Image (cartoon, rainbow, N blue to C red):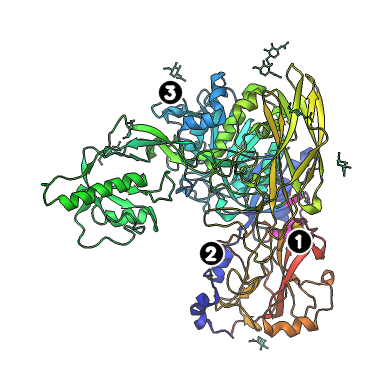
């Protein structure tokens, strides 16, 4: 039957890129929490729909075993429960259950620990970048606005965060859904107190929104007078899941938060994930929902996060700060830290290498000749391996204080140094110090015992320096749009290297980077708008448009004349809060989602309302942004080059004609203009995203409408990667129990480790990916033929039947709304475990079968067979164990 002994050795030779592991790991890679679902009750009858107990009663009567994790009670948003049970198939027969959604895992915090992007902070500088300083000058600090922070909790004992919890304090309330020990896998232990003293993420987020001014760091929140509520959904470490996010969203909604902010997410690409749907429903009720766009910029386009993809939620991209707090050290030079390194007195320097071009400095254990380093400040070059590896090698020789000098290309930004006492200094300062040391070594025979020393002034050394990438989109910031062509991210806010509050137990202050930091900034901006224009559903619903139409477009580089960054990464651009609260003109809509060529509409009406008291003539101008290739049809790989995250730029833009280019609007009236848009001509084989802005220019203010489209037809996008570019073998494929692609027929007992799994890549996302068991003799022509010669005869002899007439024996597994696979050599593929059972857990009868894999194309009709791509597995047997 099987030769399992041969297995693992063959594995690596079969796969050019990624080592694939075991079938068990394949099962664990499932995007869903096993046997966990959110059931949504149907909306018929106020009493019926509000009552879960009749549903539970029916389930008990039918002997369905289940347990309840969460219950949801928000009539406008979601009535239902998160439950666990083994046989989901039975649920569809329960009256009153309208939708059953699998629970996705895991959802993570979107903070970049070691940002590759450079970026330099100073919280005041972020306020200057965005006009928040001007709104503060008008006396608006967001007082009375309620902001629900769905995160890791808040250290409300912090002096800048009110030093208390409950009515009358800055943190007015909240709830802990999980407890300290929750890690995303174990059972949550809810309690009333959302205090964060062990994680820090939520405390950092809270400081960006609400830190009190007047402190030695010069930081303050965007809306420092707003009231905060902490909904804690992460423990001290780890992940969280959809059902808990949903519970927190609903509690924040029911507790009448004006703004809900979530600095978290998981790769999705679609607007339809469970938490996206709930967030959308809350936004549709006129609440402001800000969600991190994601930190997956390196993965290229079409990689939006859930719940950031939700319709009407404000998905927030990150812009690098224009300045950074640094400290002087006295051998000249600065190091990257908001406060002094805790080292008193001067110490001599030791360099692990005096060769300043050695990039792998201290990546290997230091030589035996190395002295005891405990009395030195050790200087080491950045490069090749993790900072912590270098620091561990130095610590192994007794080193206690380390200066890492930057490489010529590295960003000068916060770095992850683990528990070591280490800071980043600039490349110039590092070379200077090493140069001094070399000179000293040359002349030491003449100069007695004098050494080069460094000291760290404990006060008065703080200042900030300009950041070379300041004001540009952070390279880690996720690139959209969604596969249903919604603009995501919606806009951007400062998120690269932000100094904010941290739990007192963890130091009190920290610099962090990520769309996690941009998101609370946008929430604070929304609070200032609500404070200025009034709360309530109408203003809440208008906030996304107000922020978008007043945002500042972000360039792709600092070189003059370079095009604007693609809207797919910046959305409408960097929020400008002073413009948003003071505008005299309403331009609507805020964005035009131009969809793909098959769903394209050329004419779009833009309305311009003059809310001022003078007649204004507006001029309409078109300002295109970059057009970028995304995914290549021929390779199924990203066209976006990864090395420096540079998009493949296509030198063509849309053209726009206006029904009138100058429009005069009297006070209190509205006029409409029709924009007729023509997408850029040219290559459609890399699914180019084109984008830009329509400017509505008045003498005293400029507003804009942001547009984005794809110059190709998305239903033509290949979903299943059928090339061998990634693994060196054609995909999809069935991997047998020995770890090899199955070629001829094989039998499996589905006991112990004797089962196969499916290996595939998704070049584009799919709304539906399903695996069905079919007869081995099924006659159909799948869209992706097997390229393995042993089977060629079979296709040609059985190609007669059409797809729609295919009878399946039963479903094995289905994944809805799947993201694209990345090109990452370690993780850029998908697997589906196959344990010899149907989706509902019933064991498949002994016999010979194949599996039919179907992927619905983007924009495809799920009921139309022609809208699926398909692939048939080789024949395999389910046999009794010997
Ligand atoms: C901050 O300090 C200034 C000057 O010392 C003072 O006028 C102001 O009231 C303080 N603001 C707060 C919020 O404490
Ligand atoms: C600074 O370091 C010393 C010695 O390692 C330690 O005792 C002291 O608590 C530290 N101070 C701070 C503020 O971390
Ligand atoms: C830091 O050092 C630089 C250059 O040595 C000097 O110009 C600057 O004034 C110093 N800043 C502070 C705050 O000490
Ligand atoms: C684009 O068209 C597809 C197919 O009709 C549709 O499902 C999708 O919602 C459209 N997207 C937008 C932003 O209108
Ligand atoms: C779009 O607008 C242009 C110019 O106003 C007009 O000529 C054209 O007929 C319109 N097209 C459609 C499809 O409405
Ligand atoms: C018109 O608006 C300006 C400022 O926008 C204000 O100062 C002035 O009082 C207003 N005039 C009238 C008649 O409302
Ligand atoms: C529109 O207004 C601008 C600025 O006032 C002016 O330069 C331009 O000539 C006008 N265009 C038309 C077509 O009237
Ligand atoms: C533009 O600003 C100037 C100076 O603030 C003011 O005099 C003028 O009335 C403003 N124009 C409009 C249309 O608001
Ligand atoms: C690209 O354009 C060609 C020619 O117009 C068309 O046949 C093809 O379907 C297009 N492909 C996509 C992906 O839009
Ligand atoms: C699979 O099992 C069937 C039934 O036991 C047997 O006839 C067949 O030869 C086996 N095939 C392989 C490849 O072992």
Label 3 vs 2, first from the N-terminus: 3
Q: Helix, strand, or loop for circle 3?
A: loop
Q: Quadrant of the C terminus?
A: bottom right
- Residue where numbered disc 3 is placed: 214
Residue under circle 1? 716
Kindly tell me whether mark 1's CB lies below 8 Å from ligand 9: yes
Image-based side of 141 in relation to 816, left or right = left
Circle 2 sits in a helix, a strand or a loop, which is it?
loop
Quadrant holding the N terminus: bottom right
Q: Which residue is mark 2?
A: 825
Residue at horizontal 60 percent and vertical 82 percent from the top: 881
Q: Nearer the viewer, residue 61 or 779?
A: 779
Is the CB–ligand 1 distance for label 3 below 8 Å? yes
The residue lying toward the viewer, choosing from 566 and 204, is: 566
Span of residues in magenta: 87-99
Q: Nearer the viewer, residue 643 or 774?
A: 643
| Lateral position of residue 80 relative to residue 146, left or right | right
- Whether the magenta-drawn stretch holds residue 385 is answered as no
Residue 73: image x %, image y %?
68, 39
* Distance (Cα) linking label 1 and label 3: 57 Å
Closer to the observer: label 1 or label 3?
Answer: 1
Q: CA distance from mark 2 to mark 1?
A: 26 Å
The mark closer to the camera, 3 or 2, is 2
Residue 806 spot, x, y in % from top left: 81, 72
For the residues labelled 3 and 2, the Cα–Cα distance comes to 48 Å
* Residue for point 40% across, 34% down: 464
Q: Where is residue 573 drawn, in percent x and y?
A: 62, 38
């Amino acid at each position: 039957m099987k030769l399992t002994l041969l297995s693992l050795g063959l594995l690596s030779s079969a796969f050019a890129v990624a080592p694939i592991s075991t079938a068990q790991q394949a099962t664990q890679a499932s995007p869903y929490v096993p046997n966990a679902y959110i059931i949504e009750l149907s909306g018929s009858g106020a009493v019926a729909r509000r009552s879960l107990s009749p549903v539970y009663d029916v389930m008990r009567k039918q002997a369905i075993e289940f347990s309840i994790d969460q219950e949801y009670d928000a009539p406008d948003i979601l009535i239902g429960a998160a439950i666990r049970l083994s046989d989901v198939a039975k649920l569809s027969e329960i009256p009153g259950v309208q939708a059953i959604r699998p629970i996705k895992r895991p959802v993570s915090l979107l903070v970049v620990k070691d940002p590759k992007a450079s970026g330099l902070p100073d919280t005041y500088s972020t306020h200057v970048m965005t006009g928040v300083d001007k709104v503060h000058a008008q006396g608006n600090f967001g007082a009375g606005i309620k902001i629900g922070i769905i995160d890791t909790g808040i250290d409300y004992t912090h002096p800048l965060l009110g030093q208390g919890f409950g009515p009358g304090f800055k943190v007015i309330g909240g709830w802990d859904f999980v407890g300290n020990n929750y890690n995303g896998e174990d059972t949550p232990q809810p309690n009333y107190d959302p205090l964060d003293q062990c994680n820090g993420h939520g405390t950092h987020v809270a400081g960006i929104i609400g830190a009190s001014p007047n402190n030695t760091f010069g930081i303050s929140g965007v809306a420092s007078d707003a009231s905060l509520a902490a909904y804690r959904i992460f423990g001290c470490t780890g992940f969280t899941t959809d059902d808990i996010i949903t519970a927190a969203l609903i509690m924040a909604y029911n507790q009448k938060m004006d703004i809900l902010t979530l600095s978290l997410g998981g790769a999705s690409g679609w607007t339809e994930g469970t938490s996206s749907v709930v967030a959308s429903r809350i936004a549709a009720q006129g609440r402001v929902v800000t969600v991190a766009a994601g930190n997956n910029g390196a993965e290229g386009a079409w990689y939006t996060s859930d719940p950031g993809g939700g319709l009407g939620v404000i998905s927030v991209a990150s812009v690098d700060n224009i300045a950074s707090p640094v400290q002087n050290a006295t051998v000249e030079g600065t190091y990257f830290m908001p406060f002094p390194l805790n080292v008193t007195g001067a110490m001599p320097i030791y360099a692990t290498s005096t060769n300043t071009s050695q990039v792998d400095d201290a990546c290997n254990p230091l030589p035996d000749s190395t002295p005891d380093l405990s009395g030195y400040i050790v200087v080491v070059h950045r490069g090749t391996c993790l900072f912590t590896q270098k620091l561990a090698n130095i610590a192994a020789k007794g080193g206690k204080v380390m200066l890492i000098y930057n490489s010529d290309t590295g960003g000068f930004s916060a770095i992850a140094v683990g528990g070591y006492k280490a800071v980043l200094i600039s490349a110039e300062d590092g070379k200077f110090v090493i140069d001094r040391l070399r000179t000293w070594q040359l002349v030491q025979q003449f100069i007695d015992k004098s050494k080069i020393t460094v000291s760290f002034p404990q006060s008065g050394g703080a200042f900030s320096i300009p950041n070379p990438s300041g004001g540009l989109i952070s390279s880690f910031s996720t690139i959209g749009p969604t596969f249903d062509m919604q603009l995501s991210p919606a806009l951007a806010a400062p998120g690269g290297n932000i100094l904010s509050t941290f739990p007192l137990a963890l130091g009190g202050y920290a610099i962090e980077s990520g769309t996690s930091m941009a998101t609370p900034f946008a929430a604070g901006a929304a609070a200032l708008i609500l404070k200025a224009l009034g709360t309530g559903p109408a203003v809440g619903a208008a906030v996304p448009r107000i922020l978008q139409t007043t945002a500042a477009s972000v360039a792709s580089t600092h070189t003059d004349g370079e095009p604007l960054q693609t809207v797919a990464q910046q959305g409408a651009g960097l929020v400008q809060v002073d413009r948003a609260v003071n505008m005299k003109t309403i331009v609507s809509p805020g964005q035009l989602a131009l969809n793909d060529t098959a769903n394209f509409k050329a004419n779009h009406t833009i309305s311009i309302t003059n809310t001022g008291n003078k007649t204004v003539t507006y001029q309409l101008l078109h300002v295109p942004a970059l057009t970028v290739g995304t995914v290549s049809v021929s390779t199924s790989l990203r066209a976006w080059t990864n090395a420096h995250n540079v998009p493949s730029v296509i030198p063509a833009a849309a053209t726009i004609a206006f029904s009138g280019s100058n429009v005069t609007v009297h006070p209190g009236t509205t006029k409409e203009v029709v924009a007729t848009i023509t997408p850029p001509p040219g290559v459609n084989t890399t699914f180019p995203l084109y984008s830009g802005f329509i400017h509505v220019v008045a003498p005293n203010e400029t507003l804009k409408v942001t547009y984005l489209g794809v110059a190709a037809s998305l239903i033509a996008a290949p979903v299943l990667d059928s090339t061998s570019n990634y693994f060196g073998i054609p995909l999809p494929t069935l991997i047998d129990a020995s770890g090899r692609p199955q070629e001829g027929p094989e039998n499996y007992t589905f006991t112990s480790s004797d089962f196969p799994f499916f290996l595939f890549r998704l070049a584009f996302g799919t709304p539906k990916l399903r695996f069905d068991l079919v007869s081995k003799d099924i006659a159909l022509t799948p869209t992706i033929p097997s390229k393995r010669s042993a089977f060629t005869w079979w296709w040609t002899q059985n190609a007669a039947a059409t797809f729609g007439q295919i009878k399946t024996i039963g479903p094995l597994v289905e994944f809805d709304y799947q993201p694209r696979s990345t090109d990452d050599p370690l993780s850029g593929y998908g697997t589906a475990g196959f344990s010899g059972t149907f989706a509902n857990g019933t064991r498949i009868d002994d016999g010979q079968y194949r599996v039919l894999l179907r992927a619905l194309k983007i924009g495809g009709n799920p009921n139309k067979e022609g809208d699926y791509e398909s692939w048939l597995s080789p024949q395999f047997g389910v046999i009794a164990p010997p």
